Amino acid sequence: MRLPACGILALVLTLSGAGALAETSFRCNLKPISGASWIPGRITVRFSDDFTTALVTDAAFGVSVAAKVSQRSKSTYALSWSLPGLAVLTDSGQAKPRFRAALNTANLKMTIQSIRTGSAVQPPRGSGTCRREPSLSLLAQNRIGLN
């Protein structure tokens, strides 16, 4: 069975369009390097294709939350998010965990801070490595310099 030329073109455009809408994801393993507060051990960051928004999933809680994203350099993105409604014990009892992180997509490194509002103590920090998930679209690959 032969497809007309316009049918083949429609199929190619459909398949390539589906890949262009894929999200770019990174899985990160983190370790605390200072402070006594909780730093997540594993998170997943799923960027929108244009890298203007992201969902952060903490493996310990299995909850995905929206993160604010800003681009700091060609390969570094700053993220900030909170985990509302989850209890993480601190010296004062329950808290709404808030974090800010920097992800370098070139060397696949992340640094993270646990933010405590109203505290004069140095914020707990962590760092780690990330790995790129295999579902990169062509637009995302161009955005982070793989092509």
Image: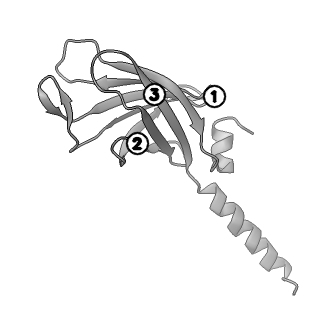
Q: Nearer the viewer, residue 98 or 38?
A: 38
Mark 2 is on which residue type?
Answer: Ala
Tell me which numbered mark, 3 or 2, is placed earlier along the sequence. 3
Residue 47 tag number: none
Residues at badges 2 and 1 in contact (C-beta under 8 Å)? no
Mark 3 is on which residue type?
Answer: Leu
Q: Name the residue located 59 percent from the left edge and 36 percent from the top edge.
A: 131
- Give the farthest residue toward the bottom: 1
Q: Is residue 31 left or right of residue 36?
A: right
On screen, residue 62 above or below 117: below
Indicate the quadrant where residue 94 lies: top left
Residue 28 visible from this viewpoint: yes
The residue carrying mark 1 is 106
On screen, residue 61 above or below 34: below
Mark 1 is on which residue type?
Answer: Ala
Q: Residues within 10 Å of mark 2 (few under 14, many from 20)?
A: some
The residue carrying mark 2 is 59
